[in-house]
Amino acid sequence: MKGTQQPMSYDDIESFLGGGGPALKFPTKGTWWTLTLTAEPEMQPQTDFDTGEPLHWPDGKPRMQMVLHGEIPEDERDDADDDGERRLFVKSGLVKAVRAAVREAKVKTLEVGGTLRIGYVKDGPKPARGYAPKVYEAHWTPPAPQPKADVAEFLGGGEDEAVTPASKPGRIAREVAAAKKNVRAKAAVAAAVADDDEPPF
């Protein structure tokens, strides 16, 4: 007798239809993932597990979640055919953990190129009805700052750039320069003549 197949969640269906990589799961305590962001975080409404319909708070406002798109390292992938693309749906207990990670890193947001290390570390107090909530721990490493462009490179200069030779003077400029030179030469001759006419000391 075949076992009963579990119904696919809305997130799994979206992934199957090309909506993104598989969602990261935390089935047991001690499960950790390392996700390097490859796209800007996006906000989406939370959906019902069975129907896929958007969920709302009692006041009518939609329950939102943050979706992180990223890539996990090779040692966390399923097999050689796994491209490492994953999504993390930040909601419920994950929100508190990610907020704490951002504050700890002294940044205001999550950026592409940064890495989120997150894990299911323990269970919270069990309520009167339902299951004990999962407690997560997260650490955020911002992307390395990009070096600022050098001013010379920004302006198009550089040591390797060929120097443009100065243009040769035109005909009029050459004639003016020649005339000035001629005047200076005549003045020098006149001064020499005047010196010869002066009496000796």
Image (cartoon, helix red, strand yellow):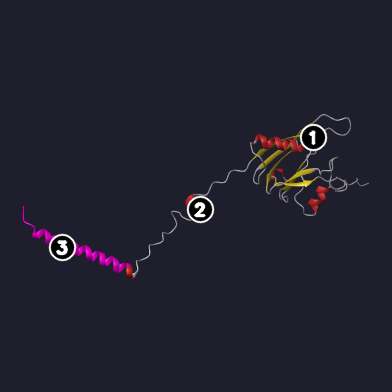
Q: For mark 3, what is the residue?
A: 190
The residue sitting at 12% across, 62% down in the picture is 193
Residue 75: where, in percent of width, then height?
A: 69, 43
Q: Nearer the viewer, mark 3 or mark 1?
A: 3
Q: Is residue 104 left or right of residue 172?
A: right
Q: Give the quarter of the image for residue 46.
A: top right
The residue sitting at 67% across, 37% down in the picture is 102
Q: Main secondary structure of the magenta part?
A: helix
Q: Secondary structure at mark 2?
A: helix
Q: For mark 1, what is the residue?
A: 134
Query: In the rendered structure, which disc, 2 or 3, sits on the residue that comes first in sequence?
Result: 2
Question: Quick check: marks 1 and 2 in contact, CB under 8 Å?
Answer: no
Q: Nearer the viewer, mark 1 or mark 2?
A: 2
Near mark 2 (Cα within 10 A), the count class, few <14, some 14-19 or many ≥20, is few
The residue sitting at 67% across, 35% down in the picture is 103
Query: In the rendered structure, which disc, 3 or 1, sits on the residue that comes first in sequence?
Result: 1
The residue sitting at 67% across, 38% down in the picture is 140
Query: In the rendered structure, which disc, 1 or 2, sits on the residue that comes first in sequence?
Result: 1
Frontmost residue, 23 versus 152: 152
